[in-house]
Image: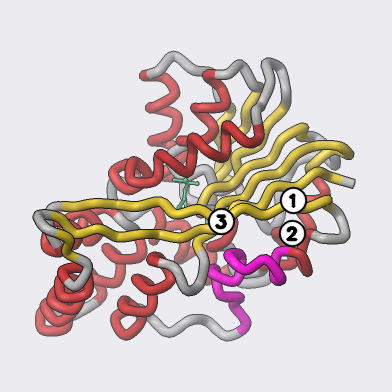
Amino acid sequence: MAFTDLKARQSVMWGNGPYERITNTIRDIHTLVVERLDPQPGEKMLDAATGTGAVALLAAERGADVVGMDLAPVLIDTARELAAERDLSVEFEVGDAEEMKYDDARFDVVASTCGIMFAPDHEAVASELARVTRQGGRIGLACWTPEGGLGQMFRMMGPFLPPPAPGVGSPFAWGREEHVRELLGDDFELEFEEHVSTLAVESGEAYWELFSSSYGPTKSATEALDEGRREEFRQTWVDFFEAMREGDEVVHPREYLLTLGTRR
Ligand SMILES: C[S@@+](CC[C@H](N)C(=O)[O-])C[C@H]1O[C@@H](n2cnc3c(N)ncnc32)[C@H](O)[C@@H]1O
């Protein structure tokens, strides 16, 4: 299997920190994807790269028969706890979007919000998405665009992150229509929507506190730096977001591409 070591590291990195604090900042995306896919009671649905299960839980509330799958065991544990708290039944399991263990055509509906875009092998993910979606089934993928607010944030973080492994596709390519057409266009009838999820926080410092404590990529990068570089990272982060100040808050617009498809 390609990228085995990288994915082993990623499964730890994504589970580093209480990710549920971060997923709360993209609730608007979860709601929109579930609205667009409109899962019906009894329909079989997959939330791929579910994280702490936000989309899976919303779909389960509508009565869908949901599987939530993610690479990070810690996040799956949290997702199970959240499902129990809400008295919802979802099959949460650890898995790899590049190599799913599901039968062909198992799902009526497949979703992923800011999720599968982070798997290194885009072609493998695309072929798995097509394989597990039944003919006539629906797919909905929300992915950050390269030029948008999250792309900019990752470019700001770049000097403080480990160098990208050779051959790994940029996650943000999933936010470009042409790339998604190349990956999925033969297997799905596709439509695209452009949206912005805007996050307002009280300060660049508050943004740093949230992400350096709770967002796997930022927290892991911080922990790998010595004290001097960590302080440089914090200052770079705070300055970057303070430049987005509007009155008494920092406003971060985060553009994303919503891909909607019907399996041919
Ligand atoms: C930014 S989080 C998004 C989680 C969730 N979909 C949400 O909306 O909050 C990205 C997720 O992708 C997962 N992920 C990354 N690579 C993966 C892979 N190869 N297979 C399955 N999940 C993966 C990570 O573990 C992480 O939970």
Residue kind at label 1, given as amino acid type: Leu
Q: Looking at the rendering, which quadrant does residue 106 occupy?
A: top right
Residue 55: x and y, percent? 51, 35
Instruction: Find disc 1 in the rendering and name its residue.
Output: 129
Q: Is residue 200 left or right of residue 121?
A: left
Instruction: Find disc 3 in the rendering and name its residue.
Output: 194
Instruction: Find disc 2 in the rendering and name its residue.
Output: 126
Q: Nearer the viewer, mark 3 or mark 2?
A: 3
Above or below residue 55? Residue 220 is below
In percent of the image, x 29 and y 72: which residue is there? 221
Residue 44: x and y, percent? 72, 27
Q: Which residues are magenta?
A: 167-180
Distance between mark 3 and mark 2 Cα atoms: 20 Å
- Work out which residue is located at the far front of the displayed protein and give it: 247
Dot 3 crowding, Cα within 10 Å, few <14, some 14–19, many 20+: some
Dot 1 and dot 3 residues touching (CB under 8 Å): no
Question: CB at mark 2 closer than 8 A to ligand 1?
Answer: no
Dot 3 and dot 2 residues touching (CB under 8 Å): no
Q: Secondary structure at mark 2?
A: helix
Residue kind at label 3, given as amino acid type: Glu
Residue kind at label 2, given as amino acid type: Ala
Q: Is residue 230 left or right of residue 7?
A: left
Above or below residue 259? Residue 233 is below
| Residue 170 among those drawn in magenta | yes
Dot 1 and dot 2 residues touching (CB under 8 Å): yes
| Residue 226 among those drawn in magenta | no
Which is more N-terminal, label 3 or label 1?
1
Q: Nearer the viewer, mark 1 or mark 3?
A: 3
Residue 81: x and y, percent? 38, 27
